Amino acid sequence: MNQEKMLHELIEVTKKNLNQAKLWQQEDDKNLNRKKDEKSWSVLECLEHLNRYSAFYLPEIARQLPKAKNKSSEEFKPGWLGNYFTKSMRPKEKLNKMKTLKSMNPLGSQLNKSVLDQFIKDQQVVLTHLEQAKEKDLASVKTGITLTKVIRFRLGDTFRFYTYHNLRHIEQARRCL
């Protein structure tokens, strides 16, 4: 895939997610904590889930991005596993339900708008990383992932997985209101 087009799409998705979070800042805490039932997540729980993933992935990306070689090709070749996980994250009409790691599950947390503030801050960091990535070979370094220490994704796959995971849960949060 063309790396420039890929990064452009990831930047646009991240900006839309960021703008949605800014709109939610206008809502009151009661609406942001409302749920369909006791097993579903509220808007703030969806965002807290994303913040927990950001706490892992943003430092990981920040460590690996400077180690990436300078871009020598316009193409990014995804790894097969990174591509598989990315495709599974992309929102689609009939979402496949997935279990989350216990440490990443915010169900029942007492949350307020500081969750939105953190998400917005994190997405601004992501935008900076995506801009820096334009000059890098995103297949030349790998990042750890939250599921296991054994598997690592190419940096480009990590950006894709992270961004579409965010989009998936932003869409979930939209359905809460």
Image (tube, rainbow, N blue to C red):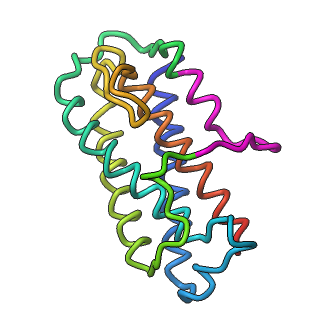
Q: Residue at x 55, y 76 (%)?
A: 24
The N terminus: image quadrant: top right
Does residue 154 appear left or right of residue 25 in this picture? left
Q: Is residue 96 magenta?
A: yes
Q: Is residue 47 magenta?
A: no
Q: In this view of the protein, which residue sits in the foreground, 136 or 37?
A: 37
128 to 30, vertically: above or below: above
Residue 164 percent across, percent down from the top left: 56, 41
142 to 39, vertically: above or below: above
Residue 75 percent across, percent down from the top left: 45, 13
Q: Residue at x 29, y 14 (%)?
A: 140
The quarter of the picture where residue 66 lies is top left
The C terminus: image quadrant: bottom right
Residue 170 percent across, percent down from the top left: 60, 58
Q: Residue at x 53, y 85 (%)?
A: 26
Tell me the magenta residue range: 83-99
22 to 156, vertically: above or below: below
Q: Residue at x 42, y 52 (%)?
A: 103
Does residue 115 appear left or right of residue 6 in this picture? left
Residue 14 percent across, percent down from the top left: 48, 50
